Amino acid sequence: MSKKTTTPKATTSKAKATPKAKAKTSKVTTPKSTTSKRAVTKGAKVLTHLLKKKSITSWEAITLYKATRLSAIIFILRKNGYGIATNDITSRDTNGNSCTFAKYILTSLPK
């Protein structure tokens, strides 16, 4: 009896090396010029508003700058060294229901 000999097929590994995820760090800076070709970010607009008027609410951010994630922008500004206090304000909506929203107040600039 003769045995058939077969050679094993070479297997190739198609697993790709995945790059390690880097933590995103965002930095909000004030707009330098309106004639610049770069678009001014919503974060920069919110920062400019805080520097001029000292406070902002989520409704102001939405209506003025279309910035719907104000808390995320405030988080980044705080991370970059800006002192921002949060005041919770309770009010009534058009139906008479109680609602609470945040008013962010600029208290200090980065050192």
Image (cartoon, grey):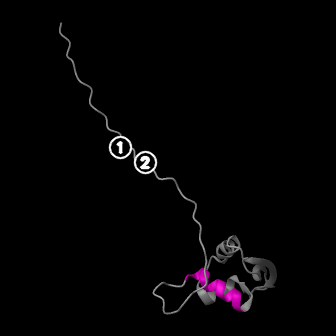
Q: Is residue 42 visible?
A: yes
Give the quadrant of the C terminus.
Answer: bottom right
Examine the structure image and report whether residue 48 is included in the region drawn in magenta.
Answer: yes
| Left or right of residue 96, residue 67 in this image | left
Residue 10, placed above or below residue 16: above
Q: Which mark is residue 14?
A: 1
What secondary structure do most residues of the magenta stretch adopt? Answer: helix
| Residue 14 image offset from top left, x and y in percent | 35, 43
Give the quadrant of the N terminus.
Answer: top left
Residue density around tag 1, few if under 14, some if 14–19, many if 20 or more, within 10 Å? few
| Residue 27 image offset from top left, x and y in percent | 60, 74
Outermost residue on the top side: it is 1
Q: Amino acid at mark 1?
A: Lys
Query: Residue sitting at 61 percent across and 86 percent down?
Result: 45
Examine the structure image and report whether residue 102 is included in the region drawn in magenta.
Answer: no
Query: Residue sitting at 20 percent across and 12 percent down?
Result: 3
Query: Residue sitting at 70 percent across and 86 percent down?
Result: 50
Which stretch is magenta?
41-52
Task: Give the number of the mark in front: 1 or 2.
Answer: 2
Mark 1 in CB contact with mark 2 (< 8 angstroms): no
Residue 95, placed above or below residue 85: below
| Residue 89 image offset from top left, x and y in percent | 81, 82
Residue behind mark 2: 17
- Front-most of residues 92 and 2: 2
The secondary element bearing badge 1 is classed as: loop
| Residue 25 image-quadrant placement | bottom right
Q: Amino acid at mark 2?
A: Ala
